[in-house]
Image (cartoon, grey):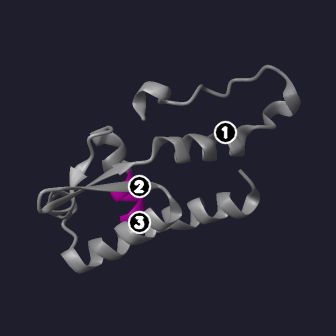
Amino acid sequence: MDNKAAVSLLTALAQESRLAVFRLLVEQGPDGLAAGKIGEHMGIPAATLSFHLKELSHAGLVQSRQEGRFVFYSANYAAISSLLAFLTENCCAGSNCAVPPPACDSDCR
């Protein structure tokens, strides 16, 4: 990951509603949540939620899938893991430090 990609991800998360939606999707795991359920849970109108989901999707932080007439959204764990790795790659000048391992391993994706 380079600085430009990291800034894109951080920019998408730098809004209160988008951050809350992303955190909700992280909690839901790989199955995600239908758009309507996200709106109900967050109390966000459909048009506003659509805008926020589009921004998160364009940044690569969420992915969507169609199931019948419903669209399900889920967190892109690989993208957030890459961002965390990028942010901490030169931590502590290479010495052993207290950076915790990523919360999700490959099974979480």
Which residue is disc 2 drawn over? 62
What secondary structure is marked by label 1? helix
Instruction: Left or right? Give the position of 39 relative to 100.
Output: left
The earlier-in-sequence mark between 3 and 2 is 3
Task: Say above or below: 105 vs 66.
Answer: above
Examine the structure image and report whether residue 21 is included in the region drawn in magenta: yes
Which residue is disc 1 drawn over? 85
Q: Amino acid at mark 2?
A: Val
What secondary structure is marked by label 3? helix
Residue 53 at x, y percent in the picture = 35, 66
Label 2 environment density (alpha carbons within 10 Å; few <14, some 14–19, many ≥20): many
Q: Amino acid at mark 3?
A: Glu
Q: Nearer the viewer, residue 17 or 56?
A: 56
CB atoms of marks 3 and 2 within 8 Å: no
What secondary structure is marked by label 2? strand
The earlier-in-sequence mark between 1 and 2 is 2
Mark 1 and mark 2: Cα distance apart in space: 18 Å
Mark 3 and mark 2: Cα distance apart in space: 16 Å
Q: Amino acid at mark 1?
A: Ala
Q: Which residues are magenta?
A: 16-22
Residue located at (44% from left, 47% from top): 76
Which residue is disc 3 drawn over? 16
The dominant secondary structure in magenta is: helix
Residue 70 at x, y percent in the picture = 15, 60
The earlier-in-sequence mark between 3 and 1 is 3
